[in-house]
Image (cartoon, rainbow, N blue to C red):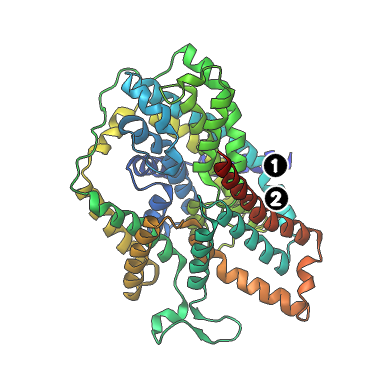
Amino acid sequence: MDILSSLMDGFGVALQPYYLFLILVGGILGTVIGMLPGLGPATGVAILLPMTFSMGPTASLITMMGVYIGAMFGGSRSSILINTPGDGAALAATFDGYPMAMKGRAESALAISAIASLIGGTIAAVLMTLMAEPVAGLAIKFGPTEYFLLMVAALSMTVSMSKGNMLKGFLSMCIGLAISTVGIDGQSGLQRFTFGVLELQTGIDFLVVIIGIYALGEVFKSFSTLGEGGKKAQTKFKKIWISKDDWKRSKWPILRSAPVGFIIGALPGAGGTMASLMCYNNEKQLSKNKEEFGHGAIEGLAAPESANNAASIGAMIPMLSLGVPGSGTTAVMMGALLMLGIQPGPLLFAQHPDTAWGLIASMFVANVILAIVNLPLAGVLVRLLAIPPKILYPIVLSLAFVGCFAISASVVDFYILIILGIAGVLMSRVDIPTSPMILAAIVGSQMEQSFRQGYRISNQDLSVFMDSGIAKGLLVVIVLSIVIPLINAIRSKMNSKSA
């Protein structure tokens, strides 16, 4: 009953006209950003982040939540119509969404995408409501050693899920940790890696890292293709809805995929891409019509769309309850909270219940609003896919530099922004994932301080990191997150040799 009462209080916040307006505006902006290939939720939230600084924490978070969920709704639009995913989480939507459009069923594809996103997001919001406070209650028992091990576990899981090469994921993490050490050490007062530059004494703001890697990195990567003509999207539609047979084939894939997507999303570093691909493969195995997958099977679109929306909400669990971001987008949102003077984590629900529960209630509201927006207005919104990149990317660049200057008013950050943008391009070309770097840049400083606090409290006895039951459990998670992918890699190599 306490959870239900708190949720009702949250709806009392989220349903106020001002916050409804913010959800609507954020959702529409997020949908547009999600549709445009190469951007995606993390880039969108990073670009719009400086605009929320003048808002209170509740308004800021609710706006960014609208952008996040809107981007997950919008990502599949370009996947279905031009076979180009708006972001990684929308990749699976190309497998059957584009073939449906090629068969003249674009209306059904757009409709089931919005319906699956609505149902998947709502189921995930219910799970979020039930789980957020209990997880936060457990986290109150965390001391410095447990927080250190929790952050190591988050980093190890992120690295282990790096596509194809854990070593590259580890390298990315080390770069992020190195960035987090720049500046004056909080305990000794010594300058570290400042190279005599006065502005670096305060460190490199992780928001600059996020904007540089995501926004500038995506723009720089697109320079080589600016002159190429893109595919033209269909912009005229009949009634955007589905038949009874479509619903019959889609309902169970949607309902099955939402909890799976939520759980995968709650794992730091896993994200919507992994959730959508896994649920697509699950439905392909379960389907009686396996031969239709890849050729326009509507359940092949419904399942990943449900999963990636559920994953976006699942990623909020570790950020709100533990203070550890579960995805690149939640990392940006966590940065916004820190800039506004609020520490995400176990005390958030006790100290700022209006913010925490208002955000959770806004997830329900945002999913409904975005389903309403994305069904009748799909024909209007997809016209934005015709914006030439030569116009779009200069706008993104301008917003990135303005946002960077708004953070610290330092010209030095412009140089850092450009360097990080180039680094983002180079990392992409050699397949080094950026998620471990971003996560490490955010939690690195706190992880170092937690380790040093625990080490000093224990009189320099490292066994303190194995004392509590929570610490032992986290150590098991760390070991398994490293060992299991290694075993799987060895098995796949052995199978390939024997084949």
Disc number for residue 3: 1
* Residue for badge 2: 135
Image location of residue 324, percent across then percent down: 60, 58
Q: Residues within 10 Å of mark 1 (few under 14, many from 20)?
A: some
412 vs 391, left or right, is right
Look at the numbered disc 2 and give the secondary structure of its residue: helix
For discs 2 and 1, the disc positioned in front in the rendered view: 2
Per the model, the C-alpha gap separating discs 2 and 1 is 13 Å
User: As drawn, which residue projects farthest toward the front?
Assistant: 498
User: Which amino acid lies under the numbered mark 1 shown in the image of this protein?
Assistant: Ile
Residue at x 28% of width, y 52% of height: 222
In x, y percent, where is residue 244?
Answer: 48, 12
Left or right: residue 370 compared with residue 396: right
Name the spot of residue 405 as percent of width and height, x first: 34, 68
Identified at 56% across, 68% down, the residue is: 444
- Of residue 493 and residue 90, the one placed in the foreground of this image is 493
Residue at image location 73% in from the left, 60% down from the top: 475
CB within 8 Å, label 2 to label 1: no
Q: Is mark 1 on a helix, strand or loop?
A: helix
- Image quadrant occupied by the C terminus: top right
> Residue 170, labelled with which disc?
none
- Residue 452 vs 320, above or below: the answer is below
Give the quadrant of residue 78.
top left
Q: Which amino acid does label 2 sit on?
A: Val
Residue nearest the observer in this picture, 231 or 186: 231
Res. 66 visible in picture:
yes
